[in-house]
Image (spheres, rainbow, N blue to C red):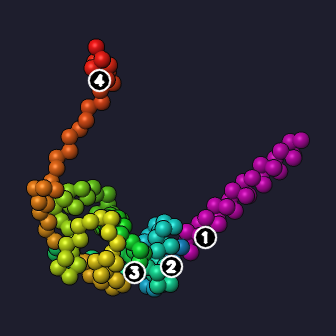
């Protein structure tokens, strides 16, 4: 029995080492692929959604949008042709986070502050409604959108009031 148990343990160790070797080969192959200039637009740690969007970009059912920042630097993001402004903002957020982490490590960006004080514009038209499709703003493949300062009108500016949870609120009215 000891020899059977020992051989089983050796098989498990060999299987583990084999799987570890496969994982190492896979990582080195992935690193070599991502260093290829043709695949320069693939993120370092791509998610399934990233890969799906890039495949759709090649098939023509997604578009590449150039985003110009206030310092006139730009970067490209890929979104589906059916994307809304909210989808574009999420893609911008993901891309900027990826760029910042690559350059400076972990850094917190207050996106709430950014979208309260800046908006995206396309051909001098402010893109404000998050639920509207990009196609309604005439944004197509290889379009440019720019960040621009945005001041909300007093009508739309609302301070949120935190509602207190009043467990016994309904009971006090009955008494």
Among the two numbered marks 2 and 3 on one chain, the one whose residue lies closer to the N terminus: 2
For this view, does 13 lie left or right of residue 119? right
Labels in figure, total? 4
Q: Which residues are magenta?
A: 1-29
How far apart are the alpha carbons under marks 3 and 4?
Answer: 52 Å
- C-alpha span from label 2 to label 1: 24 Å
Q: Residue at x 55, y 68 (%)?
A: 27
Q: Is residue 125 above or below residue 11?
A: below
Residue nearest the viewer, comparing 33 with 123: 123
- Decide which of 6, 174 is in the foreground and name it: 174
Whichever of labels 4 and 2 marks the residue nearer the N terminus, that label is 2
Q: Which mark is residue 25?
A: 1
Q: Which residue is mark 3?
A: 63
Q: In terms of sequence position, does the residue under pointer 2 or pointer 1 come before the other?
A: 1
* Contact between labelled residues 3 and 1, with CB atoms less than 8 Å apart: no
Q: Nearer the viewer, mark 1 or mark 3?
A: 3
Quadrant of the rendered image containing residue 62: bottom left
Q: 82 and 143: which one is in front?
A: 82
* Quarter of the image with the C terminus in it: top left
Residue located 36% across and 84% down the image: 141
Q: Which mark is residue 55?
A: 2
Mark 4, residue position: 169
Foreground residue among 134 and 14:
134
């Amino acid at each position: 029995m000891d020899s059977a148990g020992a051989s089983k343990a050796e098989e498990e160790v060999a299987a583990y080492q084999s799987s570890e070797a496969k994982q190492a080969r896979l990582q080195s192959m992935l690193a070599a692929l991502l260093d290829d200039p043709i695949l320069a637009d693939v993120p370092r740690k791509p998610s399934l959604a990233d890969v799906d969007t890039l495949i759709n970009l090649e098939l023509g059912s997604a578009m590449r949008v150039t985003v110009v920042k206030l310092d006139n630097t730009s970067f490209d993001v890929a979104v589906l042709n059916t994307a809304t402004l909210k989808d574009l903002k999420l893609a911008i957020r993901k891309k900027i986070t990826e760029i910042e982490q690559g350059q400076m490590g972990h850094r917190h960006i207050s996106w709430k502050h950014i979208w309260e004080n800046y908006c995206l514009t396309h051909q001098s038209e402010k893109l404000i409604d998050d639920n509207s499709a990009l196609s309604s703003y005439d944004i197509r493949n290889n379009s440019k959108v720019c960040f621009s300062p945005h001041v909300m009108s007093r009508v739309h500016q609302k301070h949120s009031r935190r509602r207190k949870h009043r467990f016994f609120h309904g009971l006090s009215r009955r008494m």
